[in-house]
Image (cartoon, rainbow, N blue to C red):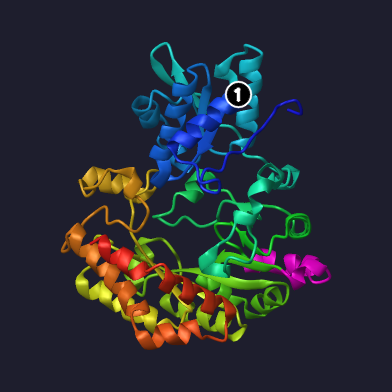
Amino acid sequence: MPNAEVEVLDCQAERLDWDGLSKAIESSEPSFVATSGFTANAYTCARTAEIAKAVDSEITTVVGGSHFSFTAEESLAQFPEIDYIVRGEGENTLVDLVKTLGADGRIADVKGLSFRANGKIVHNEDRPLITNLDSLPYPAYDLVEHNMNRYHFSMMAGRKAQYMILEGSRGCNHKCSFCTQWRYWKGVCRKKSPKRIADEIEHLNDAYGGVFLWLTDDNFEYESSAKGLWKELRNRKCRESVMLFFQARTDDVASNPELVGKLRDVGNYWVMLGVESNSDAKLKEFRKNVTPSDAYKAVKTLNDNGIFSHAMFVTGTRDDTEDSIRSQSRFSLDLGADLAIYTVLTPFPGTQYHRTALDNGWIEDFNYSHYDMAHAIMPTKTLSRDEVQRELYNCYKAFYGSYTKSISGIFSKKRLKRTMYRHMASQHVLKKLRDLI
């Protein structure tokens, strides 16, 4: 739609409160206001639509993203301020919707759309996934260029490194029981070509000074993707200045030490690992198809290659006890990762856990703003929600509460590790977690 005027309003970067958002919408006089989000900010999306309608009831409001895709019926019933929900992949559906409304066409023909009609909620048929991701345009950072000096990931790279995101793939070939994303992408993994990814990295670095680049793939597959990306980046000048952050499986990293080293040579400085647990039974429940030994091998491989190792853990499963969570905490300390993040098992809509938890009455907190993996939503068989919350804090305290460990982190030889520990100290992260108890 070359004649469409598009404005991206980043309220966080521009420090706009709700009143500021209202004034910005009033000033722009848009025909459409579109936003999207995960479960934890679903109410923020709804409030945005509500404010748009308060400014001008003729504004068409659209929401999308994984949460609204899975809760389209519930959300349209709960939030009258939302006109349309784009389910799943949104690029073509949003364009189709705008064109159809502009031509007074049949909304019922717009695939991937949910809406109200004649007092009923209607869900059009799903839209097929985009086959060739290389056909998508580059991220439209030109629309937020005026905010570029405010984009930093302070905890990871400090306030001097320009932070940007890009995607190399959509979807995942695995089906973890706590994850929404593989269902959102219909269990299909599609990838951009290595050349396209490298071109995009180079573009973000050259055009906007992007230094810390987060490749948002749900799972970067070393086996199938690493060699091609290495070949594309090894002779490009941008590899000397970028810091690439990947998300990967422990077994994939453990099985491909040579490829890990090759990507380190072209700018991969940080890898987040889905370790999840030290329990084979829990890993089986999560449908991870990995073992605790994979985690040890993966962390060692990253450490041996000078890559910052970031381990993720899940607490609060139905069978978790105080002893099992503390055993996992000891495992996380023994693992030797540079950073550990502990999350609470959260029954996100669209996951196997959500359906099971609803059917069994396990969910005690239905406030979606708490679905941030830091608030305990469900008890276990033996622990109350408050006790699960306490054990989450204890995990963090064990990992970060040691003065010796904190001082060694602050003065680590790894620059990213020094940055992270100094940020944790300055933001009083442990105190904030304690306040949740």
Residue 288 in the image, given as x and y percentages of width and height: 44, 64
Q: Quadrant of residue 225?
A: bottom right
Residue type for callout 1: Leu
Q: Is residue 365 above or below residue 223?
A: above
Pinpoint residue 328: horizontal percent, then vertical percent.
Answer: 32, 75
Q: Residue at x 65, y 52 (%)?
A: 148
Q: Residue 8 versus residue 133: which sits nearer the camera?
A: 8
Q: What residue did someone put label 1 on? A: 97
**Residue 87 appears in the figure:** no
Closer to the camera, 353 or 39? 39
Label 1 residue SS: helix
**Going by the image, does 246 lie left or right of 338?**
right
Corner quadrant of residue 160:
bottom right
Does the magenta-highlighted stretch encompass residue 232? Answer: yes
Q: Is residue 161 above or below residue 126?
A: below
The residue furthest right is 235
Residue 436: in magenta span: no
- Residue 169 visible in rendering: yes
Q: Nearer the viewer, residue 200 or 192?
A: 200
Disc 1 residue crowd, few under 14, some 14–19, many 20+, Cα 10 Å = many
Q: Main secondary structure of the magenta part?
A: helix
Give the quarter of the image for residue 110: top right
The image position of residue 26, as x and y in percent, is 54, 25
- Left or right: residue 14 compared with residue 225: left
Quadrant housing the C terminus: bottom left
Q: How many marks?
A: 1
Q: Which residue is drawn at the image coordinates 65% and 67% (left, top)?
A: 244
Image quadrant in which the N terminus is located:
top right
Measured from the top left, where is residue 114 in percent x and y? 48, 26
Q: Residue at 48% of width from left, 30% of height from top?
A: 22
The one of 61 and 360 positioned closer to us in this rendering: 61
Q: Which residues are magenta?
A: 222-241
